[in-house]
Amino acid sequence: MIHALGASQGIAIGKAFVLPHWEWELPDQKIDVADLAKEFDRLYEGIRRSKTEISQMKTELDEAVGSNEASIFDAHLAILEDPVFMNEIQGIIQRQYKVAEVAVKEAIDHFVTMFDLLDDEYMKERALDIKDVGNRLLKHLLGAPEISLPEDTQPFVLVVRELSPSQLVHLKPELVLGIVTMVGSPTSHSAIMARAFGIPMVMGVEGKLDEPIGTGDLLVIDGETGMLQIDPTPEIIARYTEMRKRLLAHKEQLLKLAEVPSVSMDGVRITLAANISSLKELDAALSNGAQGVGLFRTEFLYMDRAHFPTEDEQFEVYRAAAQKLNGNKLIIRTLDIGGDKHLDYFEMPEEENPFLGFRAIRFSLQRKDLFKIQLRAILRASYYGDVWIMYPLITSVEEVREANEVLAEAKRELLTEGIPHRADVKAGIMIEVPAAVAIADVLAEEAAFFSIGTNDLIQFTLAVDRMNEQISHMYEPFHPAILRMIRTVSEAARASGIPVSICGEIAGDVQALPIWLGLGIEELSLSAQAILPVKQSLLRSRASDSRSLLESIFRCRTAAEARALANQFHAEAALAPGNAKPPV
Ligand code: PEP
Ligand code: MG
């Protein structure tokens, strides 16, 4: 039995499907002049194999879904015959004596960068095709193993070295029973998404396996504790099947709370809104009783396609979300790309520290053309509901002002064009960088609301990379520094009379609920799966008790002491006879 990191609650029992690692190690030796002909032969053999494979896929897809979908493969075949692409590869081999793999990789990079720079959607799509075909060719040159889906297409437990959000967005949740990753940590966006989809996930297994997991191995995973068992005994299977049944039954029970008002025993209300990244997640959130959306992570809308979404494409999604919410608030966060979130069709610069780099509002303020398209789409959707705008990763007053200028320009344009929108849309900011906490009082004069993004705030304050499983034990929301920062921000918001909410993953931790109650935080934004457990805790809590607990917590010098107090309080609240009117 292996113990790794529990990243998304739930138990999965099923056969493994191991996705081979697609990050190639390219040989760096040069070739001898005498071997040039041999190198060309290798290249042509790789091309031939790639073509055969593409033609096969084309036939299969044609039979399954028809020729329209399958025609994409014609474009791929054409690239392998394209003289410009091929000349580039051959030129690198012939003139620079580089091996075929390196020549192919350099040619892909060259064309992808060139096409990406063009302001032309068609060419950007071609860049994606080139990447795809080029990777296939590389796979053959390197003799890398074949990637194919499990033959029986029974649902499987996906085993993968690491999973990017853009890969996860393409998975079919109904086929994936669970996910195991070699590296990565529970605060990464992939883990957040797995939780949103309700897919059990265990991360950071690397170094803990005696033997690698093979496709077809039977696995049991527990996404709460991080347990992974390969080839389990019948007893273990029986035990976990039973646990799985109980978990599902508990979920069913919790669903009865969906319509119950979210009020503490002494009458303090906390709005429980949802974090979503798609309309599908909004449906899940609504059936879990979400009272609005406190964070719509729009970057997934950008990942789910082969080009930047147009204004109309975005507008349709935002409007549909606003309408589904039926008058409840929808906070749309502008694009937070960068960090661990990438677009297949847009080459980001190589960065030493992507989380500290060209991302979020920094990207939007450099690409105001794209930013304005998004703001126009949000403004148009605001006509159909209670839509608010939120800027991510704000570190200064200037950024808020500059973003608001683009917003004002978007409003002016829509007004001139006679397109309906609401001119009084509220524009607020995420507080997720220590700098923003330090100047929260001045930012509160510039922003219509605050939402505290603890995921990033913790990583920046504690200098703990949220993606790094080696130090994930140091990623501690109960660290006194974090608790004090949250208090500072909530006090600054209160002093300026603007609303403040918490939208990081800690909002979904039932142990942290007394902190919000004690601080007087009136809104939390959580992943769909966390809404009802938190509501259940709220129904059993008293704000008055939470306030005294909070005083003790703020006297704690270590996170461990603070956590112990919160745990004890939580356990007692669940058991106390006076609090025992739990509807569930
Ligand atoms: C956060 O940083 O807390 C947050 C909610 O944003 P994200 O997790 O998308 O970075
Ligand atoms: Mg963030």
Image (cartoon, rainbow, N blue to C red):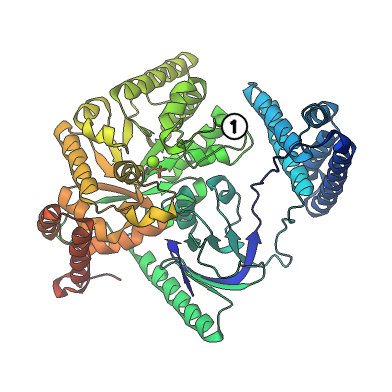
Furthest residue toward bottom: 235
Circle 1 crowding by C-alpha within 10 Å: few under 14, some 14–19, many from 20: some
Whether residue 550 sits left or right of residue 159 in the image: it is left
Q: On screen, 575 above or below 372?
A: below
Give the residue pinned by disc 1.
346
Percent from the top left, x then y, of residue 405? 37, 18
Residue 37 visible in the current orientation = yes
The foreground one among 203 and 270 is 203
- Residue at 51 percent across and 50 percent down: it is 280
Residue 8 visible in the current orientation = no
Q: Quadrant of residue 529?
A: bottom left
The foreground one among 224 and 339 is 339
Percent from the top left, x then y, of residue 285? 42, 53
The foreground one among 182 and 392 is 182
* Quadrant observed for ligand 1 in the rendered image: top left
Whether residue 484 sits left or right of residue 365 in the image: it is left
Q: On screen, 252 above or below 197?
A: below
- Residue at 65 percent across and 49 percent down: it is 22
Q: On screen, 567 above or below 575?
A: above
- Residue at 35 percent across and 57 percent down: it is 473
